[in-house]
Image (tube, helix red, strand yellow):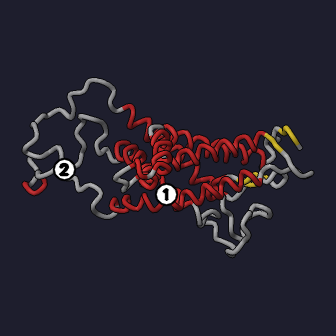
Amino acid sequence: MSAPANEQSTGVFSPSRAQIAARTLRTDRWWLPPLVTAIGLGIFVVYAGTRSFVRSAYYVADYHYLTPFYSPCLSTSCVEGSSHFGTPLPDLPMIIPLAFVGLPFLLLFRLTCYYYRKAYYRAFWLSPPACAVAEPHAKYSGETRFPLIIQNAHRYLFYAAAIISIINTYDAIVAFHSPGGFGFGLGNVILLGNVILLWAYTLSCHSCRHITGGRLKHFSKHPVRYWIWTQVSKLNTRHMQLAWITLGTLMLTDFYIMLVASGTISDLRFIG
C-alpha cells in the first residue's frame, strides 16, 4: 500500500525518485560503520553517565587529581579539596551530578557538533544509515523544527566549551602537587594530555573557524585573523579524529583517577 500523497513529497520515497524495491544496491558491508559508531558512542554514554552520578573515587587529595567528569565541583557535597573554585552551592541530591554546571554545556556542545550530528544521525536515527542506502523515514524536515532546531545553538555553545576547557586547564595545573609541595606523576601526564587534546577538539570546531575568519571579505586586510583562521582550518581537517580521541582520553583520565583515588593502584611518581 502506497503512502498518502502528502507524505510522498519529500525524502527517498518521493514519486520523482526511482522506484527500487531493494533498500540499496550496495553489496559492501555498508552497515558496519554506523554499527561501530553506535557501539562507540553507546559505551561512552553509559560510562560517562554512570561515573557522573556515582560520587566516588573522583578526587585524589594527595596530588589534587580531579576527574573532568566532576569539574567544576561547586557544591558542599563535593569531597574536601575537590572544589577548586569554592562551594557556592549547597548539598545536591544524588539525582544531580556534582558537575551539573558544566556537563550540560559540554554535552550540548558535542551533541550539536557538526561531526557528531552526522555520526548519531546515521548510527541511531538511520538518517541515512549510509550513502546510497534509503532511510526508513518518509519525510525530512531538516533542522528547522524542535528539537533539531536547537542544533543552531552550536556556535554559542562553543564559548561555553572554551570556558570549561580553561577550567580543565586550571585543574591540570593545580594537579602538579604532592604532600611535600610540587609533584609530578603519571596522572599529570594523563591530565595534561587530555587537556591538550580537548583544546585541539574545541578549537578545531567549525564554529571556531567561522569566529576567526568568518564574515571577512578580504583576508589581505586582516592578516592576523587570516593566520589564525589558517591554523584553525588545519585543525578542522582532524575534527572527526579529535572527536573520537577525546572521548577516549576523557574515559582514560577518569578511569585512571578512579583507580588511584580508590586505592586500587598507586600513582607512578616521577617527582614528589
Q: Amino acid at mark 2?
A: Ala
Residue shown at 25%/43% (left/top)? Answer: 135
Residue shown at 64%/70% (left/top)? Answer: 93
168, above or below 244, in the image: below
- In this view of the protein, can residue 205 be seen by the observer? no
Residue toward you, 43 or 104: 104
* Residue where numbered disc 2 is placed: 138
Tell me the distance, in whole angstroms, between the alpha carbons under discs 1 and 2. Answer: 33 Å
Q: Amino acid at mark 1?
A: Phe
Q: Position of residue 246 (x, y in %)?
A: 56, 43
Residue shown at 36%/56% (left/top)? Answer: 215
Residue toward you, 85 or 254: 85
Number of other residues with Cα within 10 Å of mark 2, as a class: few under 14, some 14 to 19, many 20 or more = some
Number of other residues with Cα within 10 Å of mark 1, as a class: few under 14, some 14 to 19, many 20 or more = many
127 to the left or right of 6: right
Q: Tell me the quadrant of the picture where the C terminus can be found.
A: top right
Q: Position of residue 231 (x, y in %)?
A: 50, 42
- Quick one: SS at disc 1? helix
